[in-house]
Image: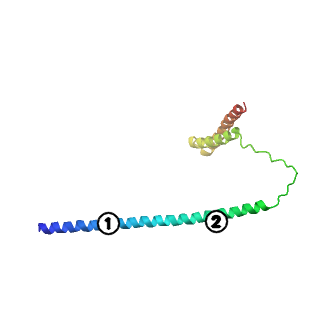
Amino acid sequence: MKNACVLLFSLLLVSCQFQNKEEIEKAKQASIDSMKTAMEQQRVVDSMQAELTRVNEEKEAVQNSKTVVVNNTTTQAAPKRKGMSNAAKGALIGAGVGAATGAIVSKKKGTGAIIGGLAGAGVGAGTGAIIDEKKKE
């Protein structure tokens, strides 16, 4: 009985080892296949980039061969927009924060949001104006 148990255990152990070797080989083959696929995809991308480069070079050659006519009239460039001032940014941020705070704190949500938004806009505009003044100096 003892010999039969030892024999059965050793067969089980040996069969598991062979199965693990087969799984390892399958995993190796899967890795190799995925690398081959990635290399093929890279070849396709490289060939597309080479074709795109060739087409761009042809376009440049055509553009360089065109005749250029120069018109001597002068035009003024459009004035550059400055964007928002710090006072406007401060008013917007203050209005948003004030409205949110007013809605949270007040029992009447709509009224609290309006009052908070107006107060926040005023404080934000004032703060932004101070920052604008300091930047001018």
In the foreground, 118 or 112: 118
Give the residue at x 23% y 67%.
12
Disc 2 crowd, CA 10 A, few/some/many (<14, 14-19, 20+) = few
Give the residue at x 33% y 68%.
22
Q: Which residue is mark 2?
A: 51
Dot 1 or dot 2, earlier in sequence: 1
Q: How many marks?
A: 2
Q: Is residue 25 left or right of residue 78?
A: left
Disc 1 crowd, CA 10 A, few/some/many (<14, 14-19, 20+) = few
Residue type (three-letter) at the residue carrying disc 1: Lys
Q: Which residue is mark 1?
A: 21
Give the residue at x 70% y 33%.
135
In the foreground, 111 or 13: 13
Q: Measure the C-alpha gap from mark 1 to mark 2.
A: 45 Å
Work out which quarter of the rendered image holds the N terminus and state it.
Answer: bottom left
Residue type (three-letter) at the residue carrying disc 2: Glu
Work out which quarter of the rendered image holds the C terminus and state it.
Answer: top right
Q: Quadrant of residue 32?
A: bottom left
Q: Quadrant of residue 109?
A: top right
Q: Secondary structure at mark 1?
A: helix
Q: Is residue 57 left or right of residue 14?
A: right
In the foreground, 59 or 120: 59
Q: Are marks 1 and 2 in contact (CB under 8 Å)?
A: no
Which callout, 1 or 2, points to the residue nearer the camera?
A: 2
Q: Secondary structure at mark 2?
A: helix
Q: Is residue 38 left or right of residue 133?
A: left
Image coordinates of residue 95 in percent, x first then y, are 65, 41
Give the residue at x 71% y 32%.
133
100 in relation to 43, above or below? above
Q: Is residue 69 left or right of residue 107?
A: right
